[in-house]
Image (tube, rainbow, N blue to C red):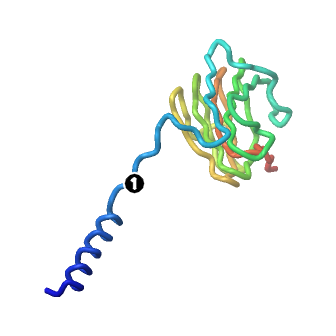
Amino acid sequence: MSTVRALTVVFCIAACASCTATPPAPDANSFAPGEEQIVHRRREIPWGPGPASVPFDCEMAVLEGDPNSAGLFTIRVRTTEPWTMPPHTHPRAERVTVLSGSIHVGLGTAATEHGGEAFTTGDYYVNAPGLVHRVWTDAPVEIQITGIGPWEVRRVE
């Protein structure tokens, strides 16, 4: 085998090996520029009045970001009474975790408070952008919502 051909084979093997090598994993303890650690202890969560966009009494806490601005946000909503949210949509995906109690989600403008899918403590679901849904509870509930702001609730009549 000629020297040129031998060097070509060695180069090809080295090039292929570098293409299949697994890149190093990012440092799990690192943050993107401008990010910092955020900690909220349950007993110290900054609860305040809920937004005017919901037709029931609730308290809300902003855990991260700003739901009224562009970018990632996480909020918690809690109620002391059963409630209903009429059919509505969101322009961006809404990720919901049920922290206590249970909620029901019915799809479409014809959804009623009978039926729907029940989600209980520990359950998680995502409402796709533009998905018409109705939400209701039979008792107090606490949920956590994560999304990309600005968070909007668009009622559907």
Instruction: Specify the quadrant of the image occupied by residue 137.
Output: top right
At label 1, the amino acid type is: Pro
Q: Residue at x 28, y 76 (%)?
A: 12
Q: Nearer the viewer, residue 44 or 51?
A: 44
Asked whether residue 68 is in view, the answer is yes
- Where residue 31 sits: x, y (%)? 57, 38
Quadrant showing the N terminus: bottom left
Tally the numbered discs.
1
Residue for badge 1: 23
Instruction: Specify the quadrant of the image occupied by residue 41.
Output: top right
Q: Nearer the viewer, residue 52 or 64?
A: 64
Q: Residue at x 61, y 31 (%)?
A: 103
Q: Is residue 57 left or right of residue 113?
A: right
Q: Residue at x 61, y 23 (%)?
A: 39
Q: Nearer the viewer, residue 75 or 71?
A: 71
Asked whether residue 112 is in view, the answer is no
Q: Within 10 angstroms of label 1, few (less than 14), some, or many (20 or more) residues?
A: few
